[in-house]
Every structure is written in C-alpha cells, then in structure tokens.
Amino acid sequence: MAIEVIESQLLHSDEMIQRFPEYGTGEIKWGAQLTVTDGEWAVFFRDGKALEVFDSGRHVLTTQNIPVLTKFVTQFGYGPDSPFRSNVVFVSKKLFPDLKWGTSDPIVFRDPEINIVRLRAFGSQSIRIKDPLLLLNNLVGRQGAFSTKKIENYLRSVIASKLPETLADANTSIFDMASKYSLIAAKTKAACLKEYENIGLEIVDLLINAINPPKSVQEIMDKKSSMSIISDMNQYMQFQTATAIEDAANNTGTAGATMGMGAGLGLGMILPQSMMNSFNANPAQPPAQQAPVANSLETKLKTLKSLLEQDLLTKEEYSAKRTKLLDSL
C-alpha cells in the first residue's frame, strides 16, 4: 500500500516521537504530501539514515525538497509514481512539565550542627526536545513510539547523581536548607545540562519540593523547636493546670468527676510548690543576699493576684493569704 498523505500521529500528552508508518506497514509514495503541525518537527528517514528535518507546514516529498533522493530513485529505475521504503518520524517541540524525580537511595550529608545525616529529596522538572536528530540517533533508535515514561528513570538518575555534589557545596545546615531550595535547584540544573544535551534534550525547570532527614532526626528537630518556644516552664505548667481544670469543669458524669479529681491532684501538687517558692525565704541565707522586705511583700502580693486571675486560687483563699501577709508587717 502506497501512502500519499502523511500527517502527525502525536495524540497523547506524554508522547515525544511517533514513527509513520510503522516498520513493514506501508511505503511512502513519491510526491506524497507531508503535513507538519505547529509545535512539531518531521524527520525523514530512508534506509535508516536521516535525510531531512522538516519544520511546520506542508511539504511534498520530491527531489526539490530532498535532493539526495535522486540517486535512489534513478538507480533502481523507479518511475515518478513509484513508492519507496522510508519513514517519517514526528518529534514534539512542546514543553513536557511536571516530570517527577526523587532519590531512590538516601544521600549521606555532613551537617555542621548534627554531623552525619541521611537525606531524601524529591521534586519535579520540565523538559523539551532541543535536537531531534540527537534524540532519535542516541536514544530512540528504531522504536515506533517514545514517551516521557521511557526516559523518566534515566533523568531521575542524572539528577540524583548531581544533587549530592550541590548539597556538599551548599555549606548549610538542614535547619536552614528550606530557605535555599531555589539556589540548590538552580545549581543542580546547571550540573545536569551536559547530560541532557547529549541526548538532544533541554532541562527547562528543576524544582525541589522537599529535602527530608530520617524520621528520628525530624523528631529531634521538633523537640528542639518545642523547647525554644517554652521559655518559662513555671508559666507553662500553670497554663497546663488551668486548662486541665477548665476541661474538667466542662465534663459531667463519672468521667468528668474522674478528670476533676486528676486535675485537683495536679493542682494540689503544683500550688504548694508555687506558694513555697513565693513565700518561703531561705533562713540560712545571709541578710545581705535577701531581697528587701518591702520588695518581697510586693512580689508575694503580685503572685497571689496572678494566681487569682488564673483561677488557681478562690477568692476566699486569696483574701485569707493576703490578710496573713499584711498582718505580718
């Protein structure tokens, strides 16, 4: 069957090339019309050799467009309407976005704060075909179709091989690494350019979504953050106790009574310690190191007032303690 009209067969979003016709499915007729749509190239092959690259538009396969065909046609005595064995490979020019990448094995990283740690990274990249002949000769070969799925593993391995070198040169801690994702991605992209160009591709964008340490290290980081937030442990414990009392008051029945008892026991343990810290002075402490009486009394009265405002003392308890303090003058 001689083919007179050749049109693009690139239908799916991940297709990079499509050969027309497939091997052994037909012959292209001399003078056939080749239609190349915008965003594509058409590479003409005869006897396994690429003879011409056509850009978008309508082309007629004759010696006017492909001068090298003359010797093939005349050598075998083909007439002007005779078919000849050849192929056209349509190659997409479009951008292939959001190709996922990630490190299959952890990266050993020397952190300036916590020493050696293993990191895993993942993100996405965007690519497009830069040189159709390089792609066909070095990667596709005789395949009838080729999609991004067939090359994703190779591209992931290229990024995974370059990323450790970039991280080693970054000289930053994992605690500050998130703020440098853009810089790390840009340097990794630059390191990958040569490998992509060797197969006719261009890496347009490289994005890093996350660089994560192991779960055990993440837990340590969370604990460190929590400790930095809780600067005054006494105030934190008072807040926790007040919250427990409020929760117990909002509960009814046996469960509420049980929680109330637990909160009461906690309050009973915390209040004496708090009051002891507020009221008891060390008798063995030399007078020169003790605070003035007026300042000490003022501090104790402020402490009582604070406990009352936090509902850690009843009004009756507050009045009794306040009277006791004033009577001691």
Image (cartoon, helix red, strand yellow):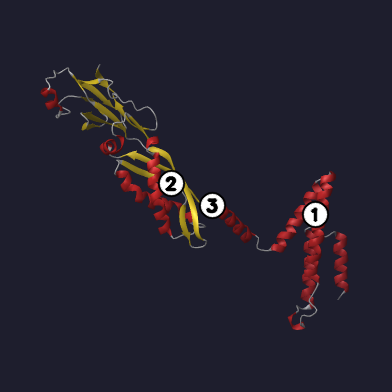
Amino acid residing under circle 2: Leu
Q: How far apart are the alpha carbons under marks 3 and 1?
A: 37 Å
Callout 3 environment at 10 Å: few (<14), some (14 to 19), or many (20+)? few
**Position of 275 relative to 182 (above/below):** below
Discs 3/1, front: 3
Earlier in the chain: of badge 2 and badge 1, it is 2
| Residue 284 x %, y % | 79, 80
Query: Front-most of 107 and 8?
Result: 107
Callout 2 environment at 10 Å: few (<14), some (14 to 19), or many (20+)? many
Task: Identify the mark at residue 207; answer none if there is no mark.
Answer: 2
> What residue do we see at 82% from left, 47% from top?
256
Q: Are marks 2 and 3 in contact (CB under 8 Å)?
A: no
Tell me the SS state at disc 1: helix
Q: Which quadrant of the figure contains the C terminus?
A: bottom right
Q: Can the viewer see residue 296 in this picture? A: yes
Amino acid residing under circle 3: Pro
Earlier in the chain: of badge 3 and badge 1, it is 3
Amino acid residing under circle 1: Ala
Q: Which residue corresponds to mark 1?
A: 263
Query: Front-most of 244 and 301?
Result: 244
Tell me the SS state at disc 3: loop
Task: Identify the mark at residue 214; answer none if there is no mark.
Answer: 3
Earlier in the chain: of badge 2 and badge 3, it is 2
Q: Are marks 2 and 1 in contact (CB under 8 Å)?
A: no
Q: Can the viewer see residue 311 in this picture? A: no
Q: Quadrant of residue 199?
A: top left
> What residue do we see at 48% from left, 49% from top?
120
| Residue 283 x %, y % | 80, 79
